[in-house]
């Protein structure tokens, strides 16, 4: 099969045996978030490119090299979403959700696309679960949002979790700080990596993320943003930390925490897992009080996070998932049209009655069909031959419990005069 057309690098098929684990991730997120007042939202897979260039930021890795951008038939520039926060905020503004009681809490489970170096835990199409609380700048929104992600990750058995948190303050404080940081970097320009030097003007904070040795050395004595925060931002951050303390959520304040998105203000955080290798980020997020304005809306505060479904699964302990159950297997004793129709009628009727049922579709012998029934763990096998149906119960002799599904099988069969 050397000529087989393969999927693009960094993408993958989700096979049936992987579906239950992935469903468990989404279901845990759904249950936790909906219990806390979040409701699901889905946005289009692609958006107008400007939505991301304006919000994620021109100088970020995502916008500079990771977006899948294309022109449609009318020459409009569109981009497959590399992240979901800006689309969710766009939807909030577009649908006038500011008229709803605030904060409006929305969650999603969506695929994202980023043209990155594909490796374990880093793909070009991947899935994120995420939560956004829009319309309140209360520090309790920040703490609650973080606590919900902590709960989801621990319920899913993600091991070796660590939470790092920082405050970026407001844009003015950040700009003042950037200037001081630039001066610091310029003073040792020769020791920096090419990449950091080339982004010295546009995005000096990325230097904290560098694993280049010379850069790291220079960063050890770098000024910290924490020392530039205004009074209100400081208080806001202290309150967030106090609430996390009250909830018993452990964290480490890391003033060098840099997130790869420009729209963050105030709180930013990231969960990492020791169970992961180089790609240790499981999920992260923060407050984005300037985002709505960047999209062209009024000033609306917001707070949220996204976590990678594949990274969660890589970091979670293996847990056996029960296979789906089939209650009734409908076998055919011969291949006559009458038998096949009767079998088909029975399987449809059973399903209508809420009984999981499958029928023979591969032309197996009766012996082969019994084996197949065993293989899928069906409790009942109905053997159809013309008008006759014989029901075999694998748990032989056990009386049928009126409330169980088997009672329903019995009643369907009885209705058909067969029970
Ligand atoms: P990283 O530092 O690993 O590049 P990031 O800061 O770019 O992550 P975010 O933009 O905050 O990540 O996305 C949130 C989460 O989405 C990450 O914590 C990670 O779990 C997941 N994620 C991000 N990029 C990828 C990818 N290319 N493949 C798989 N999962 C990803
Ligand atoms: Mg990244």
Image (cartoon, helix red, strand yellow):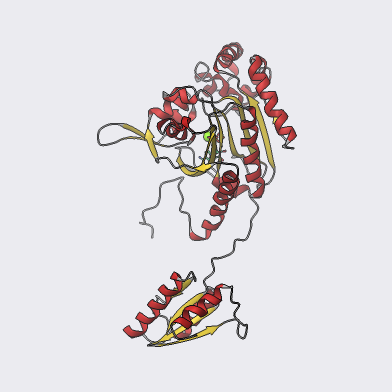
Q: Is residue 71 above or below residue 290?
A: below
Left or right? Give the position of 247 relative to 57.
Answer: right
Q: Residue at x 43, y 37 (%)?
A: 81
Ligand 1 picture quarter: top right
- Number of numbered discs visible in the structure rendering: 0
Residue depicted at x 55% and y 41%: 38
Q: Nearer the viewer, residue 331 or 219?
A: 331
Of 156 and 71, the residue lying toward us? 156
Across and down, in percent, residue 74 comes to 25, 33
Q: Is residue 368 visible?
A: no
Task: Find residue 174 and report its horizontal and vertical position in percent.
Answer: 57, 17
x, y percent for residue 136: 56, 28
Nearest the viewer among 123 and 230 is 230
Q: Is residue 320 above or below residue 255?
A: below
Q: Is residue 388 visible?
A: yes
Report the residue at 51% width, 77% height from top: 409
Q: Quarter of the image containing the N terminus?
A: bottom left
Image coords of residue 144 (percent x, y): 64, 35
Rendered image quadrant of residue 77? top left
Residue at x-position 66% and y-position 18%: 224
């Amino acid at each position: 099969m050397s000529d087989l057309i393969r999927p693009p690098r960094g993408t993958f098929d989700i096979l049936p045996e992987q579906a239950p684990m992935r469903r468990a991730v989404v279901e845990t997120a759904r249950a936790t978030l909906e219990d806390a007042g979040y409701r699901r939202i889905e946005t289009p897979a692609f958006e107008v490119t400007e939505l991301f260039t304006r919000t994620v930021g021109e100088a970020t890795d995502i916008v500079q090299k990771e977006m899948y951008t294309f022109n449609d038939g009318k020459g409009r520039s569109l981009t497959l979403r590399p992240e979901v926060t800006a689309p969710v905020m766009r939807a909030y503004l577009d649908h006038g959700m500011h008229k709803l009681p605030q904060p409006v809490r929305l969650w999603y489970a969506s695929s994202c696309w980023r043209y990155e170096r594909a490796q374990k835990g880093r793909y070009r199409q991947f899935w994120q679960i995420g939560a956004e609380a829009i319309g309140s700048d209360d520090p309790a929104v920040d703490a609650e949002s973080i606590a919900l992600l902590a709960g989801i990750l621990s319920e899913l058995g993600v091991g070796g979790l660590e939470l790092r948190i920082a405050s970026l303050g407001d844009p003015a404080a950040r700009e003042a700080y950037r200037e001081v940081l630039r001066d610091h970097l310029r003073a040792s320009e020769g020791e920096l990596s090419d990449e950091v030097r080339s982004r010295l003007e546009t995005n000096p904070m990325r230097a904290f993320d560098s694993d280049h040795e010379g850069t790291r050395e220079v960063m050890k004595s770098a000024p910290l943003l924490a020392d530039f925060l205004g009074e209100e931002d400081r208080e806001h951050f202290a309150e967030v930390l106090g609430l996390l303390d009250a909830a018993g959520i452990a964290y480490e304040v890391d003033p060098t925490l840099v997130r790869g998105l420009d729209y963050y203000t105030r709180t930013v955080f990231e969960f990492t897992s020791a169970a992961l290798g180089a790609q240790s980020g499981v999920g992260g997020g923060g407050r984005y009080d300037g985002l709505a304005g960047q999209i062209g809306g009024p000033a609306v505060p917001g707070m949220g996070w996204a976590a990678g479904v594949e990274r969660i699964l890589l970091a979670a302990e293996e847990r056996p998932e029960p296979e789906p159950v089939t209650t009734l297997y409908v076998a055919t004793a011969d291949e006559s049209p009458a038998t096949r129709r009767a079998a088909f009628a029975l399987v449809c009727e059973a399903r209508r009655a809420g009984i999981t049922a499958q029928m023979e579709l591969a032309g197996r012998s009766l012996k082969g069909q019994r084996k197949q029934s065993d293989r899928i763990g069906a409790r009942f096998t109905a053997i159809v031959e013309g008008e006759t149906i014989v029901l075999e119960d694998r748990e032989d002799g056990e009386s049928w419990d009126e409330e169980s599904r088997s009672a329903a099988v019995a009643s369907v069969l009885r209705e058909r005069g067969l029970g």
